[in-house]
Amino acid sequence: MATVAGPYGLKPINLIGGQAFNGGVIREFALTTNNTAPIGNGDLVQITAGVPTVVTSTPAVGTQKGLVGVCVGVRYQLATQQLGYPLYAQYLPANAITAGYTNVFVRVMDDPDCLFQVQATGSVTAANIGSNAQLTGFTNGTGSTTVNTTTGNSVVSLLQSSISNNNATYAVRIVDLVNESSTFGGNYPSNPGDAYTDCIVKINFGAHSYYQAQSN
């Protein structure tokens, strides 16, 4: 509901340019060292020394290393689990390895052409389509400020005050706005210009690891 602040991270919805999209191809990255921050559905994920970690600061073109995409869930086995099959979850709590989790994988939408829906921290209008913007919701090197343990979602959002036509270092480009009338949006419509507008963005060339020569 775009009239209420309720960030949910980045949600994959399509591919740029009308490419075929059936929910996207998800790549799983094994987590073999302890995660000091929770990793929520919708969090940005980077690869550091071969290990997936949550992005802990606002990414930028030319300086962000290892950004491979967005978390769309995790799978793991608990230390006391005797089921013989993995559990699938929306998010991974902090310090999972220390807690005894095994066979931990972070599931990532890693297509660099993916479009994501993300809530802005303020009102965004059609005049802002085509502009770059920063993402916010990172703090003190511990990943997302919180992960909503009810939904498992990240709290990363688009920083409305950063929207710019001139800054080429910002991580995402606004390519469209969610536009759901009260008829199609039911009780939770989302429209351009809402107090906390739902935007459709793409990670900019040079911010995504697959679109830069430097890795991590």
Image: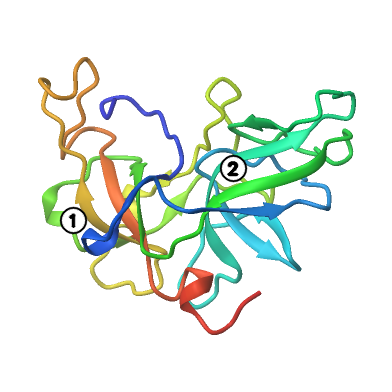
- Residue type indicated by callout 2: Ser
- The x, y position of residue 47, in whole percent, is 66, 63
- The quarter of the picture where the C terminus appears is bottom right
The quarter of the displayed image where residue 4 is located? top left
Left or right of 126 on screen, residue 32: right
- The x, y position of residue 51, in whole percent, is 74, 60
Q: Earlier in the sequence, mark 1 or mark 2?
A: 1
**Which residue corresponds to the image point at 34% horizontal and 44% vertical from the top-left?**
117
**SS of the residue under disc 1:** helix
Seen from this angle, which residue lies furthest bottom?
A: 213
Residue 144, disc = 2
**Which residue corresponds to the image point at 77% horizontal and 46% vertical from the top-left?**
35
Residue 103, relative to residue 67: is it above or below? above
Residue 186, relative to residue 109: is it above or below? above
**SS of the residue under disc 2:** loop
- Residue type indicated by callout 1: Asn
Residue at the spot of label 1: 128
**Which residue corresponds to the image point at 46% horizontal and 41% vertical from the top-left?**
9
The quarter of the displayed image where residue 122 is located? top left
Left or right of 164 on screen, residue 11: right
The answer to whether one can see residue 90 in this image is yes
The answer to whether one can see residue 131 in this image is no
